[in-house]
Amino acid sequence: MKEQNQKKLKAGSSTTKLGYNERHARSGISAPLPDIETFPNQYKSYEITIVIPEYTAICPKTNLPDFGTITLHYKPNKHCLELKALKMYVHAYRNIGIFYENAVNRILQDVVRACRPTWAKVTGEFAARGGLRSVIEAKYPE
């Protein structure tokens, strides 16, 4: 059995010894979320940092809650993010099974789609679980 699992890992199989699979990996990526509204930007050459200290979601493998702080840092172009809409968008993750890495990248993707910033960075700092703490960062443009 151990040899069989090692062969699967070497062959690039989506199943690991811990039982994670493609369904877990894709969980939450395309889940419906509220739109992030914007408003017209009136100024040039400034940056915005938004800290969201109450991020929660569900681990798609264990169904246990994940907690963290999401920091969004961006330079607006023609539009800025509307904060109440952003808050509702982030709070919607509470009911979604999604890995940290996917959540950070999805938030960046949705922010870029909503306001088309000059550049943006999303950082997720997640609470320790089992003695491990994760910090995930995604940037636009790459």
Image: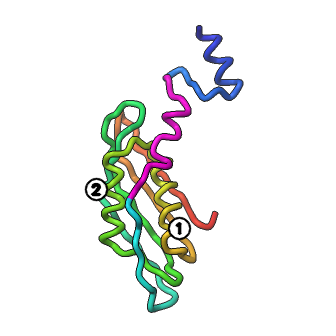
- Is the residue 131 above or below the residue 54 in the image? above
Q: Report the disc number at residue 102.
A: none
Where residue 64 appears, as percent x and y from the top left, is 32, 35
Looking at the image, can residue 127 be seen? no
Q: Residues within 10 Å of mark 2 (few under 14, many from 20)?
A: few
Q: CA distance from mark 2 to mark 1?
A: 23 Å
**Residue in view at x 44 percent, y 85 percent:** 40
Q: Which residues are magenta?
A: 19-33
Residue picked out by circle 1:
113
List x then y, in percent, for residue 112: 53, 68
Corner quadrant of residue 131: top left
The residue to which callout 2 is attached is 54
Q: Quadrant of residue 58?
A: top left
**At which x and y percent is residue 125?**
40, 53
The kind of residue tagged 2 is Glu
Say which quadrant the N terminus sits in.
Answer: top right
Kindly state the secondary structure of the residue where label 1 is placed: helix
Please tell me which residue lies in front, 111 or 121: 111
Q: Report if residue 24 lies within the magenta region.
A: yes
Which image quarter holds the C terminus? Answer: bottom right
Type of residue at label 1? Answer: Arg
Q: With 8 as the anchor, is 129 left or right in this view?
A: left
Query: Is 125 included in the stretch rendered in magenta?
Result: no
Closer to the eye: label 2 or 1: 1
Q: Which sits in the foreground, 101 or 85?
A: 85
Residue located at (44% from left, 49% from top): 31
Residue 115 or 137: which is nearer the viewer?
115
Residue for point 47% across, 84% down: 46
Residue at 49% over, 34% down: 24
